[in-house]
């Protein structure tokens, strides 16, 4: 089933933004100066948020002004959609198979080489589950320690690959600093395109590489006629790019993806 949400007729240009690591530091509040800039920047543009987190966690990071500045918010990798007033438009449900839960608990209890645990390791969300070895209750310092360890040891990438081989109906992708997202095939961030109807797409994310939870959407955009993707390294990178390419100097070139002049692929 497909919803056309707030734009049943084709629009021209839409901007899509991941949240963690893209417009906020991972699992932290948005920078106040950037939030003020972003709200003003959104005022004359079509903008949607596309996050792997649920709405409750996003509300810990973003003020109400940001939610009202965008057209809508896709959460849980596109499995839930809220309009700008916070009304629920749709929600996909998912019950993970018992075998998957047993597999994750085995990895957590006996197989992982990383031994620190902080609780909240398997989190069920609409349309997906989120799994973290160190646990979503980890402190900021513990998150950073695990992230540095995982960057060297590639545990999350290895685990995602293992899950996809053992459970062929599922996909797994690295998200944020400490976890992986697991969902049925096709129920990733790419599904938001079923609900949007624009001629040109611009997507900002920090996990656009294969194995990242932004990758399915970036890959799906490759099948669009006109698109631009930006693989950023934090909100500062996003901020700089928005200022340099997507402010008042956007031009009339029909292939323009912002001005620099960057052309759409």
Image (cartoon, helix red, strand yellow):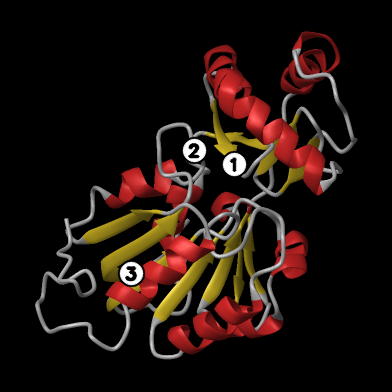
**Tag nearer the camera, 3 or 1:** 1
Q: Looking at the rendering, which quadrant does residue 179 occupy?
A: top right
Name the foreground residue: 204 vs 71: 204
Dot 3, crowdedness within 10 Å: few (<14), some or many (≥20)? Answer: many
- Above or below, comparing residue 237 to residue 251 in the picture: above
Q: Residues within 10 Å of mark 2 (few under 14, many from 20)?
A: many
The C terminus appears in which quarter of the rendering?
bottom left
Q: Position of residue 44 (x, y in %)?
A: 39, 90
- Could you classify mark 1 by the number of other residues whose Cα lies within 10 Å: few (under 14), some (14-19), or many (20 or more)? many
Task: State left or right for residue 213 relative to residue 65.
Answer: left
Quote the CA–CA distance across marks 2 and 3.
25 Å
**Residue 212, numbered circle:** 2
Residue 80 as seen in the image, left or right of residue 206? right
Q: Which residue carries the number 1 mark?
A: 175
* Image marks 1 and 2: residues in contact by CB distance under 8 Å: yes
Q: Nearer the viewer, residue 118 or 185?
A: 118
Label 1 – label 2 distance at C-alpha:
6 Å
Q: Is residue 123 visible?
A: no
Look at mark 3 in the image and give the residue it sits on: 197
Residue shown at 67% from the left, 26% from the top: 149
CA distance for labels 3 and 1: 26 Å
Dot 3: element: loop
Residue drawn at x 24%, y 73% as measured from the top left: 258
Label 2's element? loop
Work out whether 62 lies above or below 249.
above
State the image coordinates of residue 96 (x, y, percent, origin top left).
72, 31
Q: Is residue 192 left or right of residue 74?
A: left
Spot occupied by residue 253 in the image (x, y as percentages of width and height): 9, 78
Q: Residue 202's spot in the image, x, y percent?
A: 32, 64
């Amino acid at each position: 089933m497909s919803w056309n949400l707030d734009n049943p007729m084709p629009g021209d240009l839409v901007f899509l933004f991941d949240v963690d690591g893209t417009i906020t530091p991972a699992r932290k509040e948005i920078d106040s100066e950037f939030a003020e800039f972003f709200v003003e920047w959104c005022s004359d543009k079509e903008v949607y948020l596309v996050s792997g987190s649920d709405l409750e966690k996003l509300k810990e990071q973003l003020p109400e002004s940001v939610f009202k500045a965008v057209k809508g918010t896709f959460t849980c990798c596109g499995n839930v959609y809220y309009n700008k007033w916070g009304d629920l438009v749709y929600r996909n449900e998912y019950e993970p198979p018992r075998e998957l839960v047993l597999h994750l608990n085995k990895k957590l209890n006996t197989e992982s080489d990383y031994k620190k645990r902080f609780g909240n390791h398997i989190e069920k969300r609409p349309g997906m589950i989120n799994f973290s070895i160190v646990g979503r209750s980890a402190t900021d310092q513990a998150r950073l320690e695990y992230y540095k360890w995982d960057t060297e040891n590639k545990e999350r990438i290895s685990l995602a690959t293992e899950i996809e081989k053992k459970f062929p109906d599922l996909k797994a992708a690295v998200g944020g600093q400490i976890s992986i997202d697991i969902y049925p095939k096709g129920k990733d961030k790419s599904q938001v395109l079923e609900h949007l109807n624009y001629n040109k797409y611009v997507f900002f994310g920090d996990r656009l590489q294969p194995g990242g939870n932004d990758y399915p959407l970036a890959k799906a955009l490759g099948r669009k006629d006109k698109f631009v993707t930006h693989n950023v390294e934090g909100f500062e990178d996003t901020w700089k790019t928005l200022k340099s390419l997507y402010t008042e100097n956007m031009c009339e070139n029909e292939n323009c993806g912002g001005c620099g002049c960057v052309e759409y692929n």
